[in-house]
Amino acid sequence: MVESEGQGTKAPLFKFILTGGPCGGKTTAIARLSSFLRERGFEVIACAEVYTILASNGMSLDFYSTEGMDTVIQNSVLDVQLSLEDSIEKVLKARGKPAVLLCDRGPMDGKAYLSDEKWNNMLEKRGVTEADLRDTRYNACFHLVTAADGAEAFYTLDNNQARSETPEQAIDLDRRTRKSWLGHAHMYVLDNSSDFESKLQRLVNIVSKLVGLPTNLSKRSAKYLLRQRPNTTSFSVDFHIFEVEKVYLVVQNNDDDGAYSFIRKRTTNGEKKGSIHQLTDVIRRDGQEFETKRIISAREYNASYRSRDLSRHIVRQERISFLYKLQSFTIHVYQTPSRGTCILHAQVESTDDETPVVELPDFLDIERRLKQDDESTYGSCALSVIHK
């Protein structure tokens, strides 16, 4: 069973984005996830891909021959996307049961189809930021890499008449889409290094972990100690920088010695700032650790802040997020406490019997890999404790 969120007055609602280039397996993945989650007590609704809705109902490629239509179409897609998602969310909330909203593509996908100038102008006229569209709406983003990149023999558009990309175009679009979502706090890239069934099973396992269902996956990240904060001018990949404030709360459940909760505010660096607020609850059951995350409002964050654990420091970090060879990395640079400590987190999924395979970036000065025993020294939960 999934735990009730907050004070137990609401059922949890998880919102996931499935994106990627053409023929990545999104349609099949949504069908698999829907069945899997419903069988385990969740209400599930899928939000259809809006561009496909328009294209399959009369909007043709000829429309693009009219000057400025690319921006008009992406604006319309975004209008329908946000309205449709919000409407479905209201329906699921009204049910009052644990629920999952699966979105076939999302608002940031439009960035892959416009120039940076057109995209930025569109957002400016709307009065929104990328953080508003990317970070504050979804619990996780799953990028399913197109079959054209790594599984060429299976690349086909026969099941989607709205698509017309060659394999080369599909790969380019896949990479631009992936770049558009870069910066989401929980972005997972599912490549074609395994067969398609294994690709789907990886997705199911990750989703299970996120919604609090039992899974054979135990490790969420591999961690490495860096000798110093890297100079981002030496990075060979795109990256985003965020400021993070993590506040541990007074434990309400005294029956579980391992339980803890914290709220987190994650703010985008740069001219167009935007913040996302999140509540995380961690419990231990049957020897496993279950972690559930919920996006909360700024008001909820401020209310929870008043229940902070005064025996702990407020953890403040600079975080640098990037993708390297289809793997997600985040560097945590501590400001308080333990100022200057730098930890590299590689997002991996593995079982207890496996050693996660991580291809480390060559532009980082890595001292060593951290082991489980190092949590008492380098884990943020341990570092937050105020020693008297």
Image (cartoon, rainbow, N blue to C red):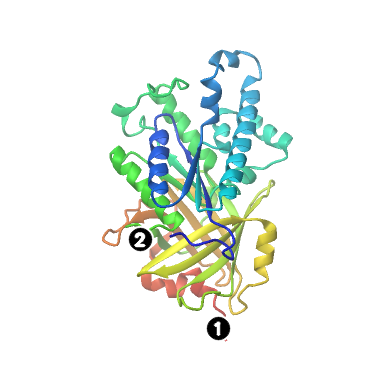
Q: Is residue 240 left or right of residue 190?
A: right
| Other-residue count near label 2 (Cα within 10 Å), few / some / many at <14 / 14–19 / ≥20 | some
Quadrant position of residue 54: top right
Residue found 38% across the figure and 46% down from its top = 36
Nearer mark to the viewer, of 1 and 2: 2
Picture coordinates of residue 179, whole percent (x, y):
51, 39
- The image position of residue 69, as x and y in percent, is 64, 20
Q: Which mark is residue 218?
A: 2
Asked if residue 85 is positioned above or below residue 376 in the image, the reply reads above
- Residue at left offset 38%, top offset 48%: 39
Within 10 angstroms of label 1, few (less than 14), some, or many (20 or more) residues?
few
In the displayed structure image, the side of residue 174 where residue 245 appears, left or right: right
Q: Earlier in the sequence, mark 1 or mark 2?
A: 2
Which quadrant is home to the N terminus?
bottom left
Kindly identify the amino acid type of the residue bearing the numbered disc 1.
Answer: His
Image coordinates for residue 119, horizontal then vertical, percent? 64, 32
Q: CA distance from mark 1 to mark 2?
A: 30 Å
Number of numbered labels in the structure image: 2
Q: For the point 39% across and 43% down, which residue is it?
A: 35
- Depicted 227 relative to depicted 162: above or below: below
- The amino acid marked with disc number 2 is Ser
Instruction: State the residue position of label 1.
Output: 387
Q: Quadrant of residue 345?
A: bottom left
- Up-down relation of residue 304 to residue 40 (above or below): below
